[in-house]
Image (cartoon, rainbow, N blue to C red):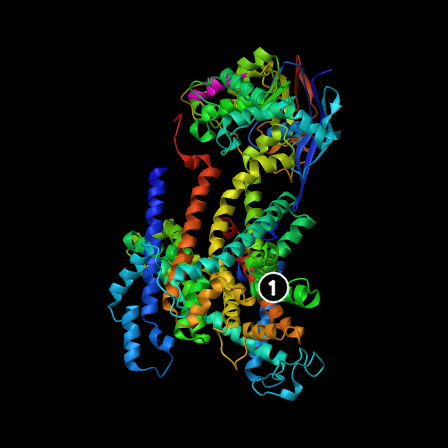
Amino acid sequence: MSVFLARRLVALFLTLLGASLAVFLILEVLPGDPATVMLGIGAQEDSLAALRAQLGLDRPAWQRYLVWIWGWFQGDLGNSYAYDEPVIKIILERLRVSLPLALMAITLSTAIGLPLGVLAAARRNSLTDVSVMGFVQVGVAIPNFWFAILMILFFSVFLKVMPAGGFAGWDAGVWPAIKSLILPAVALALPQAAILARVTRSSVLEVMREDYVRTARAKGLTFAAALWRHAVRNALIPVVTIMGLQFSFLLAGTIIIENVFYLPGLGRLIFQAIAQRDVIVVKDVVVLLAGAVVLVNFIVDMSYALLDPRLRGGGHGQ
Amino acid sequence: MALLEVEDLNVTIPTPRGTAHILSDVSFALERGECLGFAGESGCGKSITAMAVMGLLPTTAQATGRIRLDGRDLLAMDEAGLCAIRGRRVAMVFQEPMTALNPVKTIGFQVAEGPRLHLKLSKAEAGRRAVAMLRRVGLPPDRFSPDLYPYQLSGGQRQRVMIAAALACEPDILIADEPTTALDVTIQAQILDLISDVVQETGMALVMITHDLGVIAETAERMMVMYAGRIVESGPTAEVFRHMAHPYTRGLFAAIPGGPEEESRRLATIPGQVPEPIALPPGCAFAGRCARTEDDCRAAVPPAEPVGPGHRVRCLHPHVGAT
Amino acid sequence: MASDGASDGASDGAKEGGLGEVAAKALGNRSFVIGGVLTGVLIVVALVSLVWTPYSVIDMDIAGKLRVPSAAHWFGTDQFGRDVFSMMMVGAQNSIAVSLVAVGVGAGFGVPLGALAAARGGWLDETVMRFNDFAFAFPAVLSAVMITALAGPGAVNSIIAIGIFNIPVFARLTRGGALAIWKREFVMAARVAGKNAVRITVEHILPNVASILIVQATIQFALAILAEAGLSYLGLGTQPPQPSWGKMLNEAQTLMFLAPQLAIFPGVAIVLTVLGLNLLGDGLRDVLDPRLRRLR
């Protein structure tokens, strides 16, 4: 177990290193000079040179890379060119939107996808099953940003019960803040819920064919009890894998969805930073997102051990 | 009144290519404490008979006839009633100990599950009972903690866990479906001995399902031989072994490896194939493979005629005399 | 992400029939027929738009802007007075072109990479697979946003961006399928006969993984349509005045209070297209090889 853990931690570290190197190299070949962007076209050449020296842009690339990485270890992510503020401060501020949004979306998609999948499997070939599979087909075919627009049309334009966009801010109170995240979270959750329902359904169907489910029935458990106590937990293993993979899609989704709803989150931050050539912000946020994806998949791997005792090791008997 | 009476049990499954006749006119009775053996090749219907008694036929299957437990017809019973009987009055041990136990639950949980459900024992009481049952089947708690998971046990040990789980509610009937087939030869005898011991000790009835006539000889007082969904020969084990009347029974006996005849002789096989359940012939299903077939065999299904004390056979031209 | 479809009962091991038998099976498969019709309509519309549209999609008619649907303008007009139906026809052409090339790029690099990894094994295989894992860990749309933003928005760059994250999908699938085929007897026989790895790959491996790849290509095609729409919506894909569905939705959002109907049609078009391709993929899987479902 500890060997497994150590190997995973090394892999996690290497991935982050690779991601940081990749982002750095891509941005290195990027046309466009941050100093020119900051001072505007037509700035004096000597003031541009002074600013470049101040930002450390006159040093060789490998030095700048090492300085940047070293900053991460010290909790100093540099200063944004566009906002002239520490990047760490901007990121923490944006996380106050993106983190609750992601959590709401994951909770929602799990709360919808898992039960629907189990239900469809339990009533295989029934009307319920056919409806769930129909929902799945449509759910994966709808672009989430269009679904978001439709919801805005319905809830904001016609019913006028939800804000059409923007973020009320946590200072305005918890409910207004949550309220401005509800539609975005639903938009993010829909395709995820559809995929989750499909994977759960086929996984549960697979497990229900297992001998031990028949054993449970032979002990006198009802169909529902055998399904719940013996099939669902075993069926969760592939489902959890998919949930881990989905996290990466979720982050990507926030880039679009935060733009649809004009939410000041991380996704919108990176989108704007790329447009503004705010290189340092792009670098930091990309590494942060990649790190989050790798970390989530690490947690997923760990959770297998909870679901499956065979992975906890410690062989007995033979 | 017998403990379990099965009368004219017919099971069919509709398929896209026609109706499959899985069981035809199966009738037998099981007395309290009796050990009954079912023999036949795989697919002959012996496992389906067991599943019918458990009320766990596939949902597409249609069953007619009567299965009476203490006079109550299980085929007419609702699901809740069946759940109360399964595991409590009738328990079952399956062929594959490797897959019949849930890999993510402890063995203690899986043995205690029945008592908690049927006897309404508390978690602690059921746990103590599980330990006692595990000890009874040869898994003492000092070496086999109830907190072990199935993957930590060998095949034979897992089958012991299955038996412990089946015995946990002191059922009246234990159905063992090929309980030793998946095990090593050396382990097989131990598991059979264990089953015989606990059956004698508790006085419950045993239904032993196997393709191995040797197992029948060892465990069953009375036996049924099934072929293509029908009981073709039945009677007291000793009597049937002495005077095997159905050609199929004799074929099955000759197919035992290292049988009593000559150790070195090649394993005898029965020529031909079992007819498919969607295309059963109008006459004797074994007629196509039988050396004694005559025209009348193909006309109608032979009735079960007595050929000895308690000994019946569905054959128009049975073997007579000692085996 | 395969569905195990509605037609589980249909796959009773029958396979390897003649072409006629496959066609008969295809026509009996509901997913295949519905998906095929939807995809067929899309392709016909796109082809027609190459030579004819009801109105020009470039010329503006400010006086006739934001019309509601009518006999003259089936889907109404946009804020510049352009005919929405005509724009959507050209948008179909745009979606297909971008997605087709992007999937082509993904398969063009991914399949040889996967086949090579399977044929050579060892460190090469290891490297390719680690690279794959890395690409999977990276949010795909994020890299697409970066690429298009850095190299400048436009159809070509969105093709590259979408194509790049298709490469690992095809590489992984090809490698997995090829590894299984390499172990088969007829490949052993070919090796014994002295054929080299390239020839075996072309003659034996690729034909045997073709059906999995075709099915996956259909599904990737659907995903590419979604990705292209997303990039265009963000303003990073196809640039005006060339119409694209994503861009139309972006513009519709700003006019939502004035002309909500504009937000409906392009979205419906995307959903029907993606739905059609997904159904076609599911159908193809059942038709080409029922055993594929097991492999997933």
Asked if residue C154 can be seen in this view, the reply is yes
Report x, y in % for residue B120.
64, 23
* Left/right of residue C57 with respect to residue C132 in the rendered view: right
Q: Is residue A156 above or below residue A92?
A: below
- Give the extent of the magenta segment: B186-195
Residue farthest to the front? Answer: A171
On whether residue B100 falls in the magenta region, the answer is no
Instruction: Look at mark 1 in the image and give the residue it sits on.
Output: A147
Report x, y in % for residue C22.
55, 59
Element at badge 1? helix
Report x, y in % for residue B113.
58, 26
Report x, y in % for residue B319.
60, 20
Camera-nearest residue between A98 and C187: A98
Q: Amino acid at mark 1?
A: Phe
The image quarter containing residue A261 is bottom right
* Left/right of residue A53 with respect to residue B7 in the rendered view: left
Considering the image in quadrants, where does the C terminus of chain B appear?
top right
Q: Which residue is rendered at x = 75% and y = 30% of the image?
A: B76
Camera-nearest residue between C49 and A64: A64
Asked if residue C174 can be seen in this view, the reply is no
Camera-nearest residue between B151 and C121: B151
Q: Is residue B54 above or below residue A300?
A: above
On whether residue B189 falls in the magenta region, the answer is yes
Q: Which residue is rendered at x = 39% and y = 68% of the image?
A: A84
